[in-house]
Image (tube, grey):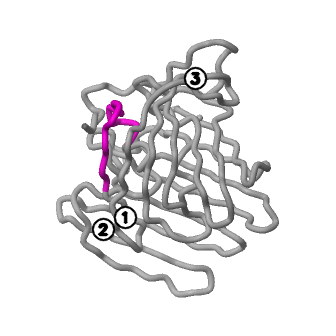
Amino acid sequence: MTVVLALLLAVAPGATPEGSLGPGEQIIYRVHWLGLPAGTADVTVGAESPDRPGSLPLVTNARSDLVVYPVRNRIISWWDPASGRSRGLEMYADENRKRRRLKIEFDRSAGKAKVFRQVEGESPREAQVEVPPGAGDVASAVFFLRTARLADGDSISMPIFTGAKLFRGLAEVEGRGPVETPLGERQAVRVRLRTEFSGNLSAREVRIWFSDDPAHVPMRMEADFALGPVVVEWTDYKPGRALDPSTVARNR
């Protein structure tokens, strides 16, 4: 799941990217595993749906054609810009030829989450569990960080619910400076996110380079997975329609 935590911009050579976090934003990534091309990922911010007023769909598609571990994942996280939190998640995963589905619906007023899980070949399972008011899903964690101020030395704690486990992620802003990317050198904010993920596609520490501007676009991610080190870099980016600043959380 950590592979989809980050992901990015097409600009003219030498131009300064001015991204906007809002509907229409799209980021394309390339993924390298053990230094070799391993797959692609794309993240798109959709428009507000009448069925879910006040939230925007964050759609992530991840693909790897590696023979040792093929991946086809699609995740939709319903993100509330006003709180910086997720209202729910739908995931359709095909990892190493094993298919599963996960759906989470957060009821913040009740402090609960409804969970639907199904693994191919097994009966579906449903549960309702208690979660803290600020809990979010894995896919929206990066967007929560994007709306933070990310000042040097900031430490940001966030409860993350995977559908099976609840744990606290801790992000620390380590500094800022230039970073080389496939789109050229960019000014970046470097953040280290410590997690408690487990499994072949998980890492307990993720290093993320965000663009050093109000949009905080994730440009690069590095993590050490059970299957080896993974590097995710942006290769294309289309800014979205800017949101009204009064409706976007700035978590401090």
- Please, what secondary structure does the residue beneath circle 1 have? strand
Residue 151 is inside the magenta segment: yes
List x then y, in percent, for residue 119: 57, 79
> Which residue is under mark 1?
161
Q: Is residue 82 left or right of residue 99?
A: left
Q: Which mark is residue 234?
A: none
Residue type marked 1: Phe
As measured in the structure, the alpha-carbon distance from the residue carrying label 1 to the one carrying label 3 is: 32 Å
Q: Is residue 138 left or right of residue 35?
A: left
- Please, what secondary structure does the residue beneath circle 3 have? strand
100 and 157: which is toward the camera: 157
93 and 183: which is toward the camera: 183
- Give the foreground label among 1 and 2: 1
- Give the foreground label among 2 and 3: 3
> Which residue is under mark 2?
113
Residue that appears at 69% across and 62% down: 71
Q: Is residue 217 left or right of residue 150?
A: right
> Which residue is under mark 3?
186
- Please, what secondary structure does the residue beneath circle 2 have? strand
List x then y, in percent, for residue 93: 60, 66
As measured in the structure, the alpha-carbon distance from the residue carrying label 1 to the one carrying label 2 is: 9 Å
Residue type marked 3: Arg
